[in-house]
């Protein structure tokens, strides 16, 4: 049976506030399979070409939209009848004078569902802003267009840290090089990473704005960075004398130990629910949750080897990699216990939820080399970005 996209539009009184107008609860459920693309025509963007190109690239990269144009602005008053015989669902108009006024219409209605003024700037940032607000109104979710991805590339003698924009189009080399980099995180202008340099493991902080690098922790024994808790704290794992220790440390070096175990443990991840981590205490690696009261609960039972937990910041969803003829990415709803396999080809590892909550970054070798992919949390969107591994999605 052909799947049909249902768009539910609840018509409420139009709200005026700071020159922003939209109809409430216009919602397109992008979490469901078989979604038909929304076809959108853009009028008046021919004189702000950079804005148009950015909107088109952003929306079309998600694979939920097809964008046509730019068409000249026909007249100030929108005539829905002109578009009703086409396959266009939405028309977005730009009127440019001392500002850019954006109006968006469903072709079935002469009243706009979105109106907003923007600064008169023909640049990518304006395009991202416009695309983000249209995306959120139509999907009910935060847009991914301002996300950034920090990742690692391997060279002949060392490894380096790089940053990409959300679709991998722009790549920035931080200049950081180490023998081994085991994890890298990005928060604002700060990069945290764990690495091996000489005979010592360390956790370091690099400031992108000042290019200053600070060594926070140094040890001859293995250190593994876990997660950022807030702007001043992070969680990590240290191996000392055959013990695995999960610790929280602030940027001034003040630390406390959360757990000490003789089991082999790794990948501590912070969430409001508690600390997720990997342990072999049941005989093979699986994911556990340690709550504030230090009670530990086993979370995964899929297969024999489950690792690399990632927590959706917007819901109770866990993503992880599981060994199954290679490694594949699964998501687990922690409330319903619904388990979904979202990758199927090659080895797929190192999941990281993006701040928008719908997309993840992963490493996949499905095309013969290690590449960073952007995938949707239901697995229906799978987009290669660039070569590399250890991706971490941030804003």
Image (tube, rainbow, N blue to C red):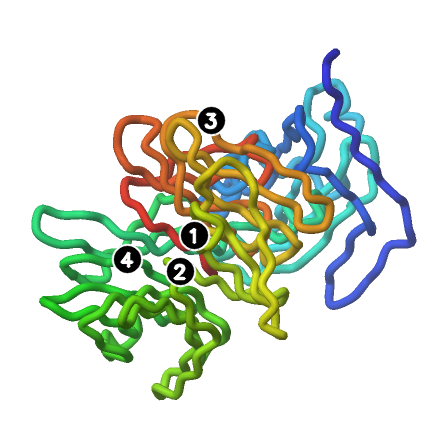
Tell me the mark number nearer the camera, choosing from 2 and 4.
2
Mark carried by residue 280: 1
Q: Earlier in the sequence, mark 1 or mark 3?
A: 1
Horizontal arrangement in the rendering, residue 360 relative to residue 29 (left or right): left
Q: Quadrant of the N terminus?
A: top right
Image coordinates for residue 354, horizontal then vertical, percent: 51, 53
User: Residue at label 2?
Assistant: 263
Tell me the mark number nearer the camera, choosing from 2 and 3.
2
Mark 1 and mark 4: span between their CA atoms? Answer: 20 Å
User: Residue at label 4?
Assistant: 182
Q: Earlier in the sequence, mark 1 or mark 4?
A: 4
Q: Secondary structure at mark 4?
A: strand
The answer to whether marks 2 and 1 mark residues whose Cβ atoms lie closer than 8 Å is yes
The answer to whether marks 2 and 4 mark residues whose Cβ atoms lie closer than 8 Å is no
Residue at point 53% right, 65% down? 275
Classed neighbour count for the residue bearing mark 4: other residues with Cα under 10 Å, few (<14), some (14–19), many (≥20): some
Horizontal arrangement in the rendering, residue 141 relative to residue 46 (left or right): right
Mark 2 and mark 4: span between their CA atoms? Answer: 20 Å
User: Residue at label 3?
Assistant: 344
Which residue occupies the foreground of this view, 113 or 28?
28
Classed neighbour count for the residue bearing mark 2: other residues with Cα under 10 Å, few (<14), some (14–19), many (≥20): some
């Amino acid at each position: 049976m052909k799947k049909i996209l249902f768009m539910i539009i609840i018509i409420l009184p139009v709200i005026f506030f700071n020159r922003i107008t939209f109809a409430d609860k216009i919602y397109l459920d992008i979490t469901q399979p078989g979604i038909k693309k929304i076809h959108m025509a853009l009028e008046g963007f021919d004189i702000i070409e950079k804005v148009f190109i950015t909107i088109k690239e952003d929306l079309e990269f998600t694979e939920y939209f097809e964008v046509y144009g730019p068409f000249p602005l026909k007249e100030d008053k929108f005539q829905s009848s002109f578009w009703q015989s086409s396959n266009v669902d939405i028309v977005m108009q730009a009127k440019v004078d001392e500002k850019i006024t954006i109006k968006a219409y469903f072709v079935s209605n002469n009243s706009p569902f979105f109106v907003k003024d923007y600064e008169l700037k023909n640049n990518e940032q304006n395009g991202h802003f416009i695309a983000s607000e249209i995306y959120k109104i139509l999907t009910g979710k935060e847009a991914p267009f301002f996300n950034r991805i920090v990742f690692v590339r391997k060279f002949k003698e060392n490894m380096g840290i790089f940053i990409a924009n959300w679709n991998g189009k722009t790549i920035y080399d931080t200049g950081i090089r180490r023998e081994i980099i085991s994890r890298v995180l990005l928060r604002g202008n700060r990069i945290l990473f764990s690495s091996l340099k000489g005979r010592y493991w360390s956790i370091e902080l690099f400031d992108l704005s000042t290019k200053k690098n600070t060594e926070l922790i140094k040890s001859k024994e293995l250190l593994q960075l876990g997660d950022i808790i807030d702007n001043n704290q992070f969680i990590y794992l240290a191996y000392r004398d055959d013990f695995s220790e999960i610790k929280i440390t602030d940027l001034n070096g003040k630390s406390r130990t959360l757990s000490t175990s003789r089991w082999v443990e790794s990948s501590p991840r912070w969430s409001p629910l508690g600390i997720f981590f990997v342990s072999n205490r049941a005989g093979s690696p699986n994911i556990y949750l340690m709550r504030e009261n230090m009670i530990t609960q086993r979370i995964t039972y899929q297969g024999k080897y489950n690792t690399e937990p990632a927590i959706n910041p917007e819901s109770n969803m866990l993503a992880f990699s599981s060994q199954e003829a290679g490694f594949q990415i699964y998501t687990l709803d922690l409330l319903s216990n619904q388990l979904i396999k979202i990758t199927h080809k090659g080895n797929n590892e190192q999941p990281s939820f993006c701040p928008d909550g719908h997309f993840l970054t992963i490493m996949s070798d499905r095309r013969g080399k290690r590449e960073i992919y952007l995938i949707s949390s239901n697995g229906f969107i799978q987009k290669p970005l660039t070569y590399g591994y250890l991706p971490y999605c941030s804003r």
